[in-house]
Image: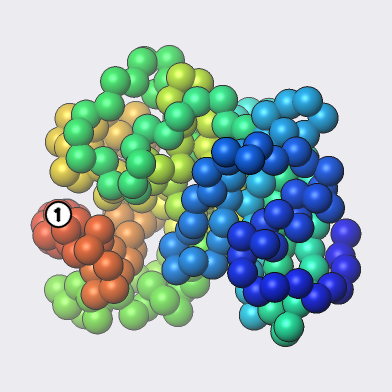
Amino acid sequence: MTSSTRRPNDLADQWQLAAKRLSAAVSPHASLQSGIGGRSLSGPVTSNGESAWLRVVVSAKPAGKTWDGPALAETAFGDDVPRPRLLDEYAWSDDAKFYQAHLWQRAEGRTVSSTPVLTTPPHLSNDWWEHLTRAVRAVARTPPPQNRSVMTQEFINRIPRFIPVLESADLTVTEWRTAHGDLHWANVTQEPLQILDWEGWGSAPAGYDAAVLLAYSLPVPDIVTQIREDFGDVLDTPNGRLAQLVICAEIIQASERDDLHANLRPYAGELASVVAQS
């Protein structure tokens, strides 16, 4: 559904507009959460008497990977990938800005961490780990989508800029698989497991999702060990090792922009050094 209208540019007003258009009831006490860079706003609503979650994003153009991602994910993945289901969406324009609203089922559990990086050991059951492993493998089994990539070979060829020891290394990806693309600890819930944020999914080096989860767990060695045990079949392969180097390079690159990744950078540098020598 798409329309054109003129409304104030304040994103909170646009969020209220989306709730009205999607017939979602808003509590007067609802607390809204702003996304990175102020480009999105999210909060709880009620839809058809059930708890739901409304997220509105603003973009310079009504197209692109993240614009299409949620709707495409809804049709690409089945029930073996636990996630809140997309209930409805709405898009509109205002003063050369484009807005998109997604109405989701409310996540059943709370996120394992409030930030992408794990800093303390979470209490996760063996069943939870088994469900996560199955879900990540189900995503990877999904045929890679056309024209949707988490990253390109071109980017991977540039990672020696961030990890100089790889200057003469062969960085060719020989196996591309479908990946969530942002599988960190603020995007998974506990008891039950659900995987959130399907905007950026696409093709990536085999093992990339496991590598991302590993990298954002580096401050907690016990969880690193758990991930290496559960995902060793993909991490301990040429493409899996390359995937680890890729996420290390991404963290090092991001460390120039924010404190979260700056704090994680020493861990990523150490991991990159170990993997590069393996």
| Residue 100 locus on image (x, y percent) | 71, 62
Vertically, is 93 above or below 134? below
> What is the quadrant of residue 173 in the picture?
bottom left
| Lateral position of residue 223 relative to residue 67, left or right | left
- Assign a secondary structure to mark 1: helix
How many numbered markers are drawn?
Answer: 1
Indicate the colouring scheme.
rainbow
Q: Residue at x 71, y 54 (%)?
A: 16
Vertically, is 29 above or below 191? below
Camera sees residue 80: yes
Camera sees residue 63: no
| Lateral position of residue 18 relative to residue 12, left or right | right
Q: Residue at x 57, y 31 (%)?
A: 107
Residue, disc 1: 267
Vertically, is 45 above or below 192? below
Amino acid type of the residue that numbered disc 1 sits on in the rendered structure: Tyr
Quadrant into which the C terminus falls: bottom left
Residue ranking furthest to the front: 28
Q: Residue at x 72, y 33 (%)?
A: 46
> What is the quadrant of residue 74 in the picture?
top right
Quadrant into which the N terminus falls: bottom right
How crowded pointer 1 is (Cα within 10 Å; few <14, some 14-19, many 20+) is rated as many
| Residue 227 locus on image (x, y percent) | 30, 34
| Residue 167 locus on image (x, y percent) | 21, 80
| Lateral position of residue 199 relative to residue 269, left or right | right
| Residue 13 locus on image (x, y percent) | 67, 62
User: Which residue is at the front of the view, 120 or 36?
Assistant: 36
Vertically, is 40 above or below 190? below
| Lateral position of residue 252 relative to residue 242, left or right | left
User: Which residue is at the front of the view, 111 or 238?
Assistant: 111
